[in-house]
Image (spheres, grey):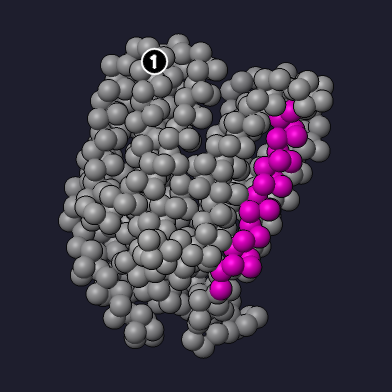
């Protein structure tokens, strides 16, 4: 009991609650309501292909901005001891932009896309600094459990609000709302409020890790750019970090492809839209206890073995998906994915945190999150090419097997102990 109390202390819970808060944006806005509402409300009367292009453009531009800024902002935050300030700045941006969607009138797709894009920047930019704080809040040797707690609370918090929002849209009169459109607009306000409230614990309950030679103002910016330049030069020497990032990019691309393409794949098989929404909710709620379980597995089996186990399950899911022909099977797959999705994400984050110098955590997690923004690029293209060549979406899903196999093999070659030793040496030297 004593050991558990040391793991889940005030700063750990405060840190993890941010995931509880901002995951509402990922579930209700990104995965759930915004894509549908963008087509049916803000692009009313517009061709489906046109609205799809507009939504894709908003997503792409926002992602590219995050890709460009993440490592730079991480380096600046490390040099200035400003990780928490940057986190709160991006969280505030995401909150304001999400809440503002409530006021966008029908047909105003340009404003909706603009606010949504900045919301993504706030969400993704905040995660760079949220992830980087893991090394300072997690007790030594407990990174797996702490990282898993964050993802677990994210699944639960995001899932609870999403469930409420779904009920609101299906039964708007229960809540005194005129129709489903009004319910969706109110949902955006609820997400903003949820995100804001659960950002407060990290503000007051987590202390900024100490930074040697802390700088301010333009000196912080210039030293951040210099630090980034040095890290680009050093990254070639950090073979183990580089090897992990390549493997991570491949298998997380497979994970994200399934997340983003599962509903589309289910629709291509003729499954009802309501059933697909239920499956999404199932994955969220199964993901809560499963992420905690994977944290335990990481401690028992080893972090790398835990990730490899999750990848093996994804391989089985992908092959099974090829032969699936009923909604019941889709639900079973949703449960199976929920069992490993959060675990793979949580253990990957904690595994990476052991391979990098703690005094440059924000910068290194900038690279980590940059690769995350490039995820779900290879997989959808592979699926699209195979679908066109074969004319069968069932064959297309098998293309993702290549990503899981490649990522798993590369991860197997990563030497965690050697990587941790090098990271400790770099931290002591200050990478100067």
Judge whether 127 appears above or below 223 on screen: above
Q: Residue at x 66, y 31 (%)?
A: 165
Label 1 sits on a secondary structure element that is helix
Q: Which residue is mark 1?
A: 328
Q: Residue at x 46, y 46 (%)?
A: 152
Counting from the top left corner in percent of width and height, residue 331 is at: 41, 22
Q: Residue at x 55, y 37 (%)?
A: 159
Which secondary structure dominates the residues rendered in magenta?
helix
On the image, which quarter does residue 402 sit in?
top left
Within 10 Å of the Cα at label 1, are there few (<14), some (14-19), or many (20+) other Cα atoms?
few
Judge whether 39 appears above or below 213 on screen: above
Counting from the top left corner in percent of width and height, residue 19 is at: 54, 51
On the image, which quarter does residue 207 sit in?
bottom right
Residue 205 on the magenta span: yes
Which quadrant: the C terminus? Answer: bottom left
Residue 63 on the magenta span: no
On the image, which quarter does residue 1 sit in?
bottom left
Residue 235 is at least partly visible in this image: yes
Which one is nearer the viewer's eye here, 18 or 13? 13
Q: Residue at x 39, y 69 (%)?
A: 139
Please report the bounds of the magenta region as a residue range. Answer: 183-207
Judge whether 432 appears above or below 279 on screen: below
Judge whether 341 appears above or below 136 on screen: above
In the shown orientation, is residue 110 left or right of residue 432? right
Residue 71 is at least partly visible in this image: no
Counting from the top left corner in percent of width and height, residue 232 is at: 38, 70
Given the current orientation, which residue lies at the most extreme bottom position? 213
Counting from the top left corner in percent of width and height, residue 22 is at: 59, 49
In the shown orientation, is residue 43 left or right of residue 271? right
Which one is nearer the viewer's eye here, 64 or 264? 264
């Amino acid at each position: 009991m004593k050991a558990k109390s040391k793991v889940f202390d005030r700063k750990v819970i405060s840190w993890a609650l941010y995931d509880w808060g901002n995951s509402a944006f990922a579930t209700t806005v990104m995965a759930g309501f915004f894509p549908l509402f963008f087509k049916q409300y803000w692009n009313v009367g517009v061709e489906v292909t046109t609205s799809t292009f507009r939504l894709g453009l908003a997503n792409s531009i926002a992602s590219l901005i995050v890709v460009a800024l993440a490592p730079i902002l991480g380096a600046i935050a490390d040099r200035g001891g400003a990780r928490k300030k940057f986190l709160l700045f991006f969280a505030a941006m995401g909150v304001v932009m999400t809440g503002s969607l409530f006021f966008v009138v029908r047909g105003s797709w340009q404003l909706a896309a603009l606010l949504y894009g900045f919301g993504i920047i706030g969400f993704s930019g905040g995660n760079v600094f949220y992830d980087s704080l893991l090394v300072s809040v997690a007790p030594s040797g407990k990174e797996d459990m702490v990282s898993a707690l964050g993802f677990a609370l994210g699944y639960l918090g995001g899932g609870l609000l999403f469930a409420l929002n779904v009920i609101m849209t299906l039964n708007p009169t229960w809540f005194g709302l005129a129709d489903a459109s009004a319910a969706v607009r109110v949902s955006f306000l609820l997400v903003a409020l949820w995100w804001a409230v659960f950002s407060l614990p990290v503000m007051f309950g987590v202390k900024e890790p100490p930074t040697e030679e802390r700088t301010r103002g333009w000196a912080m910016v210039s030293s951040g750019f210099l630090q980034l330049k040095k890290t680009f030069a050093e990254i070639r020497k950090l073979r183990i970090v580089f090897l992990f990032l390549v493997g991570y990019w491949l298998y997380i691309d497979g994970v994200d492809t399934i997340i983003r393409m599962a509903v589309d794949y289910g629709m291509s098989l003729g499954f009802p839209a309501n059933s697909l929404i239920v499956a999404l909710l199932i994955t969220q709620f199964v993901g809560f206890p499963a992420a905690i379980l994977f944290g335990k597995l990481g401690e028992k089996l080893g972090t790398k073995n835990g990730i490899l186990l999750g990848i093996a399950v994804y391989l089985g899911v992908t092959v099974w998906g090829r032969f699936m022909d009923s909604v019941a099977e889709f639900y079973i797959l949703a449960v199976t994915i929920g069992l490993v999705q959060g675990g793979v994400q949580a253990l990957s984050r904690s595994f990476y945190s052991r391979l990098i110098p703690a005094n440059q955590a924000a910068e290194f997690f900038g690279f980590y999150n940059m690769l995350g923004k490039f995820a779900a690029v290879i997989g959808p293209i592979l699926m699209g090419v195979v679908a066109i060549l074969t004319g069968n979406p069932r064959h297309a899903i098998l293309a993702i097997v290549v990503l899981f196999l490649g990522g798993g093999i590369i991860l197997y070659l990563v030497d965690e102990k050697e990587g941790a030793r090098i990271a400790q040496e770099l931290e002591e030297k200050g990478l100067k």
